[in-house]
Image (cartoon, grey):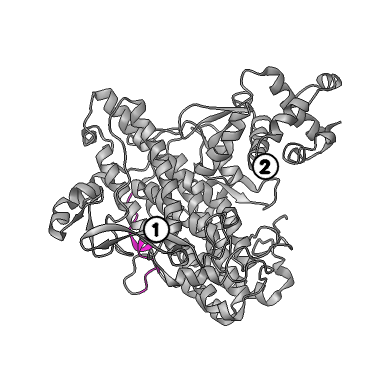
Amino acid sequence: MTSPQAELEKPDFSTLAEKLRGVPADSRKLLVRILEMAYGQNREGRQPDTAYLPELHESCGLDVEGMYEALQPLQQAGLIEVENQYPFEDVHLMPGDESGRTLLRMVCSVCQRKKISLRDVLVELRFDLLS
Amino acid sequence: MNIDYSQTIPNNVELSSDKTLQRALERWQPAFKDWWKDTGPLDTSDLQVYLRTAVNVDKDGWANFGYVRMPDYRWGVFLVPRDEARTISFGEHKGQPAWQEVPGEYRSALRRIIVTQGDTEPASVEQQRLLGKTAPSLYDMRNIFQVNVEEGRHLWAMVYLLHRYFGKDGREEAVNLLERRSGDTNNPRILTAFNEQTRHWIAFFMFAFFTDRDGKFQLASLAESGFDPLSRTCRFMLTEEAHHLFVGESGVARTVQRTCEVMAEHGLADPAEGRQHGVIDLHTLQKFINFHYSVTLDLYGSDVSSNAATYYTSGLKGRHLETRQDDDHKLNSDEYPVLEVEDGKIIEKKVPALTALNARLRDDYNKEIQAGLDRWNRIPEKFGLAFRFRLPHQGFHRKIGSFAGHFVSPDGQLMTESDWNSHRNEWLPTEADHQYVESLMGQVIEPGKFANWIAPPARGINGLPIDFAYVRFN
């Protein structure tokens, strides 16, 4: 998770919020699961900033069709990239955008510290809760 | 909406507040456990299996992973939370509040729907009883056991509805659900596809891809039901079902991957080759696709069905994604195209949309199945092979519906019975094909090792490595 030092820099979440506003709610819900997998427990041996499709299938109840349908808007918004071998693809968060990934890590970190639901922030778009 | 695991029967329906119902289900529970022991996965009672268990039906996640002895799995009753404002979204009761009790006039029809759905759940467990003995890896063994325990839980879901809402009749039906047996000539399961043998893992993967997907579409239609407890039950069942479809799709994909690897390694281009190297040739896999697809299409019933129309008009069973359909949700004046055989030709005919709801649901199913085949086809394409899997024509090898009694080739040509039979072995798996596939099936229990006929998954379960001991033998 991100250091408290970074939080002191008063991050600007407006670009992230804007991107998310253009994404359907079901895809935003999936993004929450992706972040939980990528930045949650059991991080040992994992690729950084990455969730794996099989673990998403088992944890969020989306079948293969539903999964690809929900991933597509996230890809189009530049929030994720899907790579690797079908049907075990990896979902990389904001590839090539280190500052974007830092923001996502920060959202997770603040939510965890303040005991705010990640879902409230990213699905309900309540970024005000982070301040 | 946490699940209360302190009760004998885990639940989130406040079972303890209805002592009569609680006692009735507690009486049914030992019979269920006996059924599991008699017909569930063979010789597995001492195995520790890395399973997911539902701990919550709420937004913040529902699955908990850990080692469980399957007989100790906490089968229970889980419904998604009630939406107080929910109204019926289709049929003649459209706009009325969803029913919290069974309307008297629909009691018989609803019971029939629930019993038919409920009967499929234990049936698939029975069909797959022996497959743990030939699992190609611990990863796969865990996956089939996960599917099995959740199909068992889906039986609980339907039995709860029968006990809670259908009185003595419902309790009797719940008993019958444990007495019928897949493939039993005297007391078979209700639907034909659930009496077929699942002889090997290819049949299992195909079943999970094709037939479990029919289950998904049926559950999705029932999730639209005006009978709210049925809707809430099915919504959570769909969440669990999603993984079963992944197991099927990825299982076939890994089989195709391995075959293509071997073909590339040995310079094979003929899709009928590969057996000499211990893999399942693409041509044989196509035959299994033809079989499982056609048998599953029969589960949708007759293309034109007055029962389906009645269920819809009555608000009992909707369409797939009913609320997303852009129409009046009554369909009294709409038409829908169906295929029929007339004067020796296959023709498209428009019929009242209300009577064509089975055909429509099957068409929605077809779109998903085709998308799945397209994904499988990326694998031979990646290896530079010209072979592509194809869905047979919807009239091929049908026993129910407008093509029953007709002889249609996979590419949609009407044939005579003798012509069709002369090609049967090219199109459908033969006994020799089954025996060949069975000859490859041997249990692999070393963590991280896989049978030769199937490629390892690229990722493990719950983010764990592929060589994790997903099943422990004590």
- Residue B8's x, y, as percent? 65, 64
Dot 2 alpha-carbon crowd within 10 angstroms: few under 14, some 14 to 19, many 20 or more: some
**Residue B137's image quarter?**
top left
Which secondary structure lies at badge 2? helix
At a point 69% along the width and 61% down the height, the residue shown is B12
B83 or B62, nearer to the observer: B83
Q: Is residue B157 left or right of residue B132?
A: right
The N terminus of chain B - image quarter: bottom right
Residue B407 visible to an observer of this rendering: yes
Dot 1 alpha-carbon crowd within 10 angstroms: few under 14, some 14 to 19, many 20 or more: some
Q: For marks 1 and 2, give the CA distance.
A: 34 Å
B363 or B130, nearer to the observer: B363
Taking B189 as reference, is A22 above or below it?
above
* Amino acid residing under circle 1: Pro
- Residue B253's x, y, as percent? 39, 37
- Residue A28's x, y, as percent? 67, 38
Q: Which mark is residue B337?
A: 1
Which secondary structure lies at badge 1? strand
SS assignment for the magenta stretch, majority: loop
| Magenta highlight on residue A32 | no
- Residue B102's x, y, as percent? 62, 75
Magenta-tinted stretch: B187-200
Residue B462 visible to an observer of this rendering: no
Q: Residue furthest front?
A: B333
The chain letter under disc 2 is A
B90 or B105, nearer to the observer: B90
* Amino acid residing under circle 2: Ala
The residue identified by callout 2 is: A25
Q: Is residue A14 left or right of residue B20?
A: right
Q: Is residue B246 left or right of residue B298?
A: right
